Amino acid sequence: MLKICKILPLFWLISCTLGPEYQAQDFFGTSEPQNTITISRQWYKVFADEKLNSLIEEALRRSPDVKIAISRLQQARYLLEIKKVDYFPKVDGAAAYNYAFAPEYGETGSSGSYFKLGLDAVWELDIWGKGRRQTQRYAALYQASINNLENTSLTLAAEVANNYVLLRTTQEQLRIAEENLKTEREILQAVQKKYQNGMSDETALQQAEFALQTTQSTIPVLQYRKSAYENAILLLCGRIPDDKNDLENIKGGLDVRNFRIDYLKLKQTPLNVIRNRPDVKAAEQQLIAKNAAIGEAIAAMFPSVGLSALLGRQAHTVKSLDNSRQASYGYAADITTPLWHWGEMLKQVKLSRAEKEEYFYLYQNSVLTAANELQNSLNALEQEIKRRELLQKAALSMEKILKSQRLKYDEGLIEFSDLLYSEQNLLKSRDDLAQSFGAVCQNLIGFYKSAGGGMGNP
């Protein structure tokens, strides 16, 4: 035992960690950004809508997707805790009983019992760093699970917000359609009155009825969309479709006056803010894990050194185990080295290197995709803001035109087709305005998601 104790320090001195060290990738070629914006993890509160806030928070608590991600995170943590002690000494309690009978020529034979009680210890020295690389690999996979949970939460919040915006937009379209129905009924009554007095022809009457029926036909489609968005929100919140009373009580569209979009500030967001995106960080952790796997494969090609020891008592009877003279101990050291399967292990190293190369490009692709999404979301937001401002002006103009056209029609100065044209244009401009405002909100959601949803901030 003393000899082994003298050799152990030598093993510690020559121990090393084989394989390449991970080098962080910089796809931007820049240092940390000087000017940036701070995004809150509760970015959705920018909409100043308490119902939206409560739905997202409910989804984050109840969604099966989040619970699945949490379960996977727990599995990764337990796996890390298991793997990081693989190369620590293992001590087991050992108890054994053995009975044997041996026949002898010309005699009845002999028999005996054997009892053993004690401790067995085994330790494979991590000289080449195989165990340390394994711990690095599973630590990276654990971190990737944390990032995947963050990405699941971010994606879920964005999905709830998107469907909520679509629901509110559809409700606004329904309100506009119902308001327009009221106007068209008034116009139809005026045409009917003129027709009865011989001041209008049947064509005008049919046109008025056609306009009313056309608008009425849009109601079922909008009602279906409204129900579909409600069901989508309930699914994301982990609820059944019947449980939608609180959603049906929501009225009207999102009000632009409730929040302000500081686009000029958002536009200053540097491209490398995507480093904080959880899916990008998860991709990098996967790359780190593959890099550590190369070290594991290389270390497996070198000789392994193991130590074993036992301490206990051995006797032919259970009662004799109490006797201190039955104490026994032993120790051993062994070295094993790969021989005939060297080529297989060399190919394993090459395989690990090839896998690392694949995950490098996967990581690069995630960065490029994230950068593209961030730029597209900013561009889409800018253009939709401009479009909404123009549509708002157009809707106000059409309201004035329709009011003027109705007065002229009542006085017989214009044909009904002119009035109908103006009325249809007003309906379209109001509907376009509602959809445009919804698109502004969706593009804003897309920006926060593509920027990482504040996951890099406390």
Image: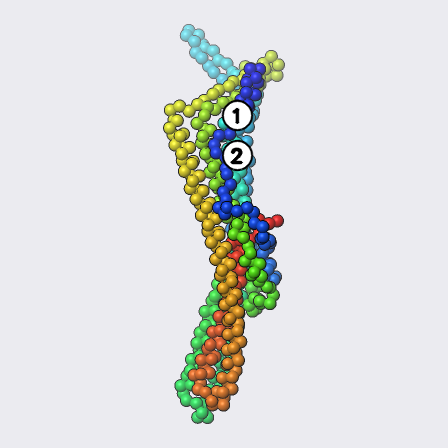
Q: Residue at x 55, y 23 (%)?
A: 13
Q: Residue at x 62, y 14 (%)?
A: 324
| Tag 1–tag 2 contact (CB < 8 Å) | no
Please name whichever residue, 121 or 169, is drawn nearer the observer in this view of the structure: 169
Whether residue 344 is visible: yes
Looking at the rendering, which quadrant does residue 195 occupy? bottom left
Between discs 1 and 2, the one toward the N terminus: 1
Three-letter residue code for mark 2? Thr
Q: Residue at x 49, y 22 (%)?
A: 305
Three-letter residue code for mark 1? Ser
Q: Which residue bears the numbered disc 2?
A: 135
> In the figure, is residue 211 to the left or right of 320?
left
Numbered label attached to residue 250 = none
Q: Which residue bears the numbered disc 1?
A: 15
Badge 2: few (under 14), some or many (20 or more) residues near its Cα, within 10 Å? many
Find the residue positioned furthest to the bottom. 197
Q: Residue at x 44, y 27 (%)?
A: 301
Badge 1: few (under 14), some or many (20 or more) residues near its Cα, within 10 Å? some
Residue 41 versus residue 102 in the image, above or below: below
What distance separates the C-alpha of mark 1 from that of mark 2?
16 Å
Q: Position of residue 399 (x, y in %)?
A: 52, 78
Q: Position of residue 27 (x, y in %)?
A: 48, 46
Q: Position of residue 226 (x, y in %)?
A: 50, 66
**How many numbered circles does the render carry?**
2
Residue 393 versus residue 144 in the image, above or below: below
